[in-house]
Amino acid sequence: MAFGIRSGSILRALGCMTAAGAFFFGSGMAAQAAGCGTPVEPGYHDVSVDVGGTPRSGVVFVPDSYTGQDKVSVVFDFHGSNSNPRGQMLRSSWDKVAAKNGFLVFAPQGSLSGNMPGTNAWNVPGVTFREGGLDEVAFIKAAVEKVKQSYCVDPAQIFASGYSGGGRMLSAYLCSGANDFAGAGFVNSLRVGLPVENREGKWGADPSTCQPAKPISIMAFAGIKDEQNPYAGGGKPYWQYSFKTALQRWMELDGCKANAKPDTIEGVTYSLYDTCQNGARIATYEFENGSHDWPKPNAKANVIAAASEGQAAGVVKVSAVKKPSFDPNVDPAYRMWDFFRKADSTDVVATARPSSAKAKVQAVGCAGDEASTMNTEGMTCSNSQPNDQPRRSGLGAKGAL
């Protein structure tokens, strides 16, 4: 009997050890499956994502510093309408920021065909009803999981940036209750649910169409002279309410308690709302002369920025020069990255430097239903289309991009 007890104890002990071994083995497999331990060739890679048996696509950029051993951050870069993943990275320069700072960029591709060959658009829920449109929310969820499984990433450091139609898609994704992104940036695209007109004829955001999972840090850029997604509202049926209305609603959803004190320099107004719930913050840049184009710092600002880093060559130290409260020459991707990675610091957005000097290039594809022309150098975008469509609900706007 004693032997039986001892045998049973031994067997139970072995069982526990086996279970523990299986646990540790399983954990190792999970870590391996998460992408850590496997190096990846740097550069751009086309990626296929299976969504319920339907293949979807995107492009990932891997910096030279990536080893597959250390967990890194990821930024999802959502293209605008009539564009594509590579064209968006060319426009946004997120790949340049990633190369300098050692994180990954994943640019997903919308399911709709754009107005020009080789371009795409997003099937934004509640807005776009066109043949060929797929479930974009399911795709984005699957793409996030694909990235986490394929690369060594920190799941708490996954961020997103959207331009024009891509920003509207990103807004819809956050509004769906998805909890994947730790922070989000919007360039000429901040939305917070579908537009609805009240009895007084004023447009606002329908609260039933935006229920985020949690307060989230947001940085938004807006051009006051944007004709595609008008700053003051109006425009296409899916747009209608103003940037200020969208901002106010996000402040309510994030539980921000105090208004920011706007600071304006050279026609650029910067505001930071940093008393929100769960450590969330909202930062905005509003451009007095801004159009629908992705903002770029001017050449003079780039020269100054480059000189400020050349102290070894005898340049006057930056500390000896009184800095303004913020630099109005804004490069959104660099500012967003500083905002994302230093979300617990104060005023980090205002002190971020613009990017190093480089010539402005035209992205492949135009965004937000822009008119386009072709020339020998590629595609250029024009903002000349009028916005004289009558006001109506964004629901059921057939053919809208």
Image (cartoon, rainbow, N blue to C red):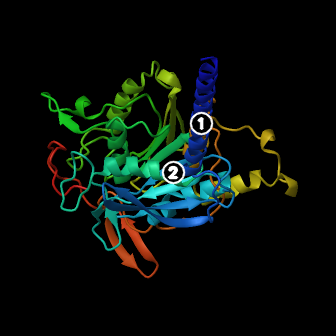
Q: Position of residue 380 (x, y in %)?
A: 40, 70
Kind of residue sitting beneath label 2: Gln
Q: In the image, what residue occupies the spot 51% across and 51% down?
A: 149
Is residue 199 visible in the rendered image? The answer is: yes
Q: In the image, what residue occupies the spot 45% across and 40% down?
A: 180
Figure quadrant of the C terminus: bottom left
- Circles 2 and 1 in contact, beta carbons < 8 Å: no
Q: Is residue 188 above or below residue 401?
A: above
Kind of residue sitting beneath label 1: Thr
Q: In the image, what residue occupies the spot 32% across and 42% down?
A: 172
Q: Is residue 115 above or below residue 238?
A: below
Label 2 SS? helix
Q: Which residue is mark 2?
A: 149
Q: In the rendered structure, which disc, 2 or 1, sits on the residue that comes first in sequence?
A: 1
Pair 2/1: label in front: 1
Q: Position of residue 199 (x, y in %)?
A: 12, 28
Classify residue 356 by image quadrant. bottom right
- Real-space Cα separation, disc 2 to disc 1, in angstroms: 27 Å
Q: Which residue is mark 1?
A: 18
